[in-house]
Image (tube, helix red, strand yellow):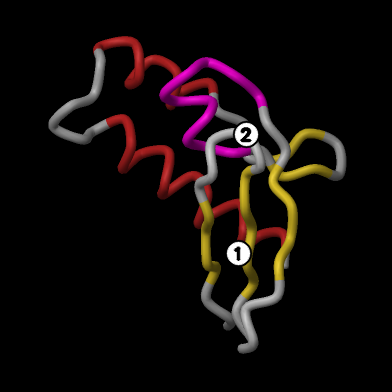
Amino acid sequence: MSDRVIAALRKEARWLSKRADAKPDWMVRETYYNPRIENAYQCPSCFIRFDRRSELDSFPTGTRDDGLECAVCGADFIIAAP
């Protein structure tokens, strides 16, 4: 799961940094975003928008896809199964 999840979280960080309402520092933070620290996936929304590191928790999706959610900002991410 890790390479697929990391790629999806980086893609989300890029998307956030290029949104129409993005602040100038969001693009800078996207450069420094690390989707995984030790064994924990990090929320791209918290990092890009708030300059905060928040761990993502797994949740069941009922499919083969992986679900990750942030208890801090409420963002959730569905990572498509290969």
**Membership of 44 in magenta stretch:** yes
The local secondary structure at tag 2 comes to loop
Residue at left offset 71%, top offset 44%: 41
For the C terminus, the image quarter is bottom right
Q: Residue tagged by mark 2?
A: 72
* Residue 28 location, quadrant: top left
Q: Position of residue 21 (x, y in %)?
A: 17, 27
Q: Which residues are magenta?
A: 43-53
Please report the residue visible at 60 percent of the width from the left and 79 percent of the height from the top: 65
Task: Give, as a three-letter code, the residue at label 2.
Answer: Val
Question: What secondary structure is marked by label 1?
Answer: helix
Residue marked by disc 1? 4
**Residue at left offset 61%, top offset 88%:** 63
Q: Which mark is residue 52?
A: none
The residue lying at 60 percent from left, 64 percent from top is 4
Q: Position of residue 67 (x, y in %)?
A: 62, 67
Q: Is residue 8 above or below residue 1?
A: above
Q: Is 21 positioned to the left or the right of 7 in the image? A: left
- The x and y percentages for residue 56 are 69, 46
Neighbours of disc 2 within 10 Å: few (<14), some (14-19), many (20+): some
Image quarter of the N terminus: bottom right
